[in-house]
């Protein structure tokens, strides 16, 4: 592993712009962007990596992103990564680590999966500072809010179902219902990831709506006079983190909202850092294209002017077999017919991705049990549907195993560059919220429409009366199905999306629509991954998968 100062120097970032966290990771000052643009005004090409609907263990979207970048480097191209930070909730919960795997990992993997540079702690602290000040002003009767009007919860970077619903201020006059979200679902996380400067961060924090008065008037964070203190907590967290892949590809790893309950993209600043310092920037979005991909475009790109030059859809033979009706325990058994049946799921995500008029390449993330005849089923499907296709063997072979994918993606960009139209969104900004949800449901999920339960109707009416009806929509939906029913695999048809409630993220700039049983505080499984994690007598951390 190279010293991080050398990684930075190779892409033109001077050490004066770095704050070092040991020899292997650093924070990059925002001034580095201006310095680079002065000598390199043209941005690189942006490659967005998404996926089909995953199995419970995930399909290797991060490992593919890292391997693709290493493949681009292996072929002599200038490349940088822009990826999300892992949350410790999944690390200790079901999925384990999220720093790639095998020969396509981020380094130092264990630190990235755990405390890293403290960004999640800063976000959690800023969020909970505001929560404590709200309750303090309720106690002293210094706020227009009534206890029942507070919407601002607390957050914790841990999966804990017991904290979803709690009582706050037990026994006090201002006692009220409350709860915890996971830090990845905090609006502060979304605000940090969408901010472009400290001034933008401050303005977004002041716009946060923490609740409503009895008369239905929004109460903003600015009224509690602690946005300056929140900025102080977030000052260092706003700066992107620079690390590297196992083969020395520079990686800006910053921000970590989930895509099933939040907007699912790394920070705008990390993406811009990668674009400014390399000819190709590889970034990912959370879960499948129906979640992370749609939000990357309709929220992140809409707010910032970013636009992908190419899209990669990660598919695995095992996920296609699952969608073709094979039980999870039998996914390693060869079954080309089941792969063919499962292609409906790939077809749905491919159609959604192609609707944005960007070239799409399907990356088959190879697993040892994959049979050639199963892989050929996917290749034939892609040929028939006008999509590129490449085998990605980056877990086992690193950059060498990503060369085929790298060449396919570069060719797709070169072939479409002259004809690439301006990015179109799923819905116009001035469309009513109900119409936006209908558009997402029909165009991305393939639903017949969407229904709002009475509580959702009431909450939306409150938000619209307060002037927030023009915001984009962030759908909180299961990652296990294109529909809002996690049991419906493949490509569900003849269904409707049900919205049970809404949450307002005025600082981030969107409205969250809660569908199905989605909770913004996940739970631990019966046997959490934390039971396998330990420290050896020599002080090495063991048991974090994907690290």
Image: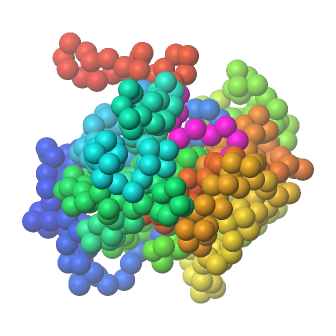
Q: Which residues are magenta?
A: 515-523
Q: Nearer the viewer, residue 207 or 191?
A: 207
Q: Is residue 153 above or below residue 275?
A: above
Q: Going 21% across and 52% down the picture, which residue do you hit?
A: 233
Horizontally, residue 113 falls left or right of residue 456, namely left
Q: Quadrant of residue 293?
A: bottom right
* Picture coordinates of residue 279, whole percent (x, y): 39, 72
Q: Nearer the viewer, residue 145 or 201?
A: 145
516 falls in the magenta region: yes
Q: Nearer the viewer, residue 360 or 165?
A: 165
Task: Give the quarter of the figure containing the N terminus.
Answer: top left
Q: Going 74% across and 49% down the picture, which residue do you hit?
A: 454
Q: Quadrant of residue 297?
A: bottom right
Q: Going 25% across and 15% down the picture, which residue do you hit?
A: 536
Q: Is residue 430 above or below residue 262?
A: below
- State whether residue 475 appears in this view: no
Horizontally, residue 366 falls left or right of residue 489, namely left
């Amino acid at each position: 592993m190279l010293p991080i100062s050398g990684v930075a120097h190779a892409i033109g970032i001077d050490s004066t712009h770095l704050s070092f966290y040991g020899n292997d990771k650093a924070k990059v000052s925002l001034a580095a962007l201006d310095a680079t643009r002065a000598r390199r005004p043209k941005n690189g090409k942006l490659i967005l990596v998404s996926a089909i609907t995953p199995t419970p263990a995930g399909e290797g979207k991060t490992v593919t992103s890292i391997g693709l970048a290493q493949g681009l480097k292996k072929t002599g191209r200038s490349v940088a990564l822009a990826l999300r930070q892992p949350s410790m909730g999944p690390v200790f919960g079901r999925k384990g680590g999220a720093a790639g795997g095998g020969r396509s990992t981020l380094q130092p993997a264990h630190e990235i999966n755990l405390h890293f540079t403290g960004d999640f702690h800063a976000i959690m602290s800023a969020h909970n500072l505001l929560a404590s000040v709200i309750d303090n002003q309720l106690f002293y009767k210094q706020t227009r809010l009534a206890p029942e009007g507070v919407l601002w919860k607390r957050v914790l970077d841990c999966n804990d179902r017991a904290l979803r619903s709690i009582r706050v201020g037990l026994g006090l006059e201002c006692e009220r219902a409350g709860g915890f979200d996971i830090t990845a679902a905090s609006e502060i996380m979304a605000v940090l990831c969408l901010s472009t400067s400290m001034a933008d961060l401050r303005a977004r924090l002041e716009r946060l709506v923490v609740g409503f008065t009895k008369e239905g008037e929004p109460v903003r964070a600015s009224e509690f006079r602690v946005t300056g203190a929140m900025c102080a907590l977030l000052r260092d967290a706003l700066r992107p983190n620079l690390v590297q892949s196992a083969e020395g590809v520079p990686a800006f790893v910053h921000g970590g909202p989930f895509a099933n309950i939040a907007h699912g993209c790394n920070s705008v600043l990390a993406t811009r850092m990668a674009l400014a310092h390399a000819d190709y920037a590889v970034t990912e979005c959370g879960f499948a294209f129906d979640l992370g991909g749609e939000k990357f475009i309709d929220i992140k790109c809409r707010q910032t002017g970013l636009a992908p030059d190419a899209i990669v859809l990660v598919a695995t033979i095992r996920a296609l077999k699952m969608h073709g009706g094979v039980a999870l325990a039998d996914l390693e058994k060869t079954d080309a017919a089941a792969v063919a049946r499962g292609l409906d799921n790939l077809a749905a995500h491919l159609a959604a991705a192609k609707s944005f008029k960007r070239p799409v390449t399907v990356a088959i993330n190879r697993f040892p049990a994959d049979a050639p005849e199963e892989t050929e089923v996917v290749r034939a499907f892609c040929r028939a549907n006008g999509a590129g296709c490449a085998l990605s063997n980056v877990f086992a072979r690193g950059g060498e195993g990503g060369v085929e994918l790298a060449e396919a993606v570069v060719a797709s960009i070169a072939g479409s560059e002259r004809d690439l139209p301006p990015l179109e969104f799923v819905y116009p900004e001035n469309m009513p919220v109900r119409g936006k949800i209908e558009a997402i449901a029909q165009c991305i999920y393939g639903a017949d429409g969407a229904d709002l339960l009475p509580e959702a109707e009431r909450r939306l009416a409150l938000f619209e009366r307060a002037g927030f009806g023009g915001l984009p929509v962030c759908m909180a939906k299961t990652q296990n199905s294109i529909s809002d029913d996690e049991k419906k695999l493949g490509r569900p048809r003849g269904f409707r999306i049900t919205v049970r409630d809404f949450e307002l993220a005025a600082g981030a700039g969107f409205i969250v629509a809660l569908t199905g049983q989605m909770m913004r505080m996940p739970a631990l499984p019966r046997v959490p991954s934390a039971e396998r994690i330990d420290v050896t007598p020599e002080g090495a951390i063991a048991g974090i998968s994907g690290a």
